Image (cartoon, rainbow, N blue to C red):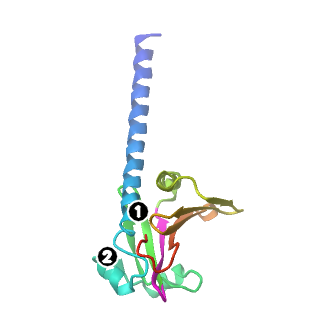
Amino acid sequence: MTWLAIFIAHDVQRRDCRRATAGGLAAIAFVIAIINSANADWQYTKWGMSVEQAQRASKGSLRFPTAKEQAEKTIQSLAPALVGIHRTPQYQFNCALYFGGRGLERVNLAANDYSQKEAIIASIRAIYGEPVETNRLRKQIIYKWRDDRGNNFIQVSDIFFIRNLNIHYTPMRTGAERGL
């Protein structure tokens, strides 16, 4: 092997190592952000909070949705009461909070960059382990986790035919003190 071939092989290994290290650090940063979110009742909220409490706690990062946003984000006849952007060190999500008779009862995060779906799902696996259920349907894959410590059900819907990744948080027990 010539010195040039050895140099090129060493340089490729060094770049691959840097790339792997950077990717690993990004995943660790996301995991830390999500773990801190889960342990802190999803940023600044707790299950059962009122709309006003959640908006006040958000310090301006959540706002009331427009009529168009309400129509687009309604789930099972429940429109979001607050919307905003949720940022982690590596990812950005559109966020919607849903309230019912018992206050905050659902948080949805929609990934802004579908190309990051594998990394996002891997990060969630790093936090909660393997999903308790995986459903492979014709046009989507649904992963489900239980977070007994944080009182959360977590569902990730990979709707690949429209390139959409959604993360849904709901309480396991209503009225519990722990939450997102």
From which residue to which does the magenta span run? Answer: 100-112
Ranked by sequence position, the earlier of labels 2 and 1 is 2
Please give the residue where the numbered disc 1 appears in the rendered image.
92
Most distant residue in the right direction: 138
The CA distance from mark 2 to mark 1 is 16 Å
Residue corresponding to mark 2: 58
SS category of the residue bearing label 1: strand
* Image quarter of residue 8: top left
Residue 178 coordinates in the image, percent (x, y):
41, 71
Asked if 91 appears above or below 51 in the picture, the reply is above
Residue 7, picture quadrant:
top left
Give the image quarter of residue 85.
bottom left
Residue 81 position within the rendered picture, expressed as x and y whole percent measured from the top left: 43, 84
Q: Is 141 situated above or below 96?
A: above
Residue count near mark 1 (Cα–Cα under 10 Å), binned few <14, some 14–19, many ≥20: some
* Magenta part, dominant SS: strand
Q: Nearer the viewer, mark 2 or mark 1?
A: 2
Q: Secondary structure at mark 2?
A: loop
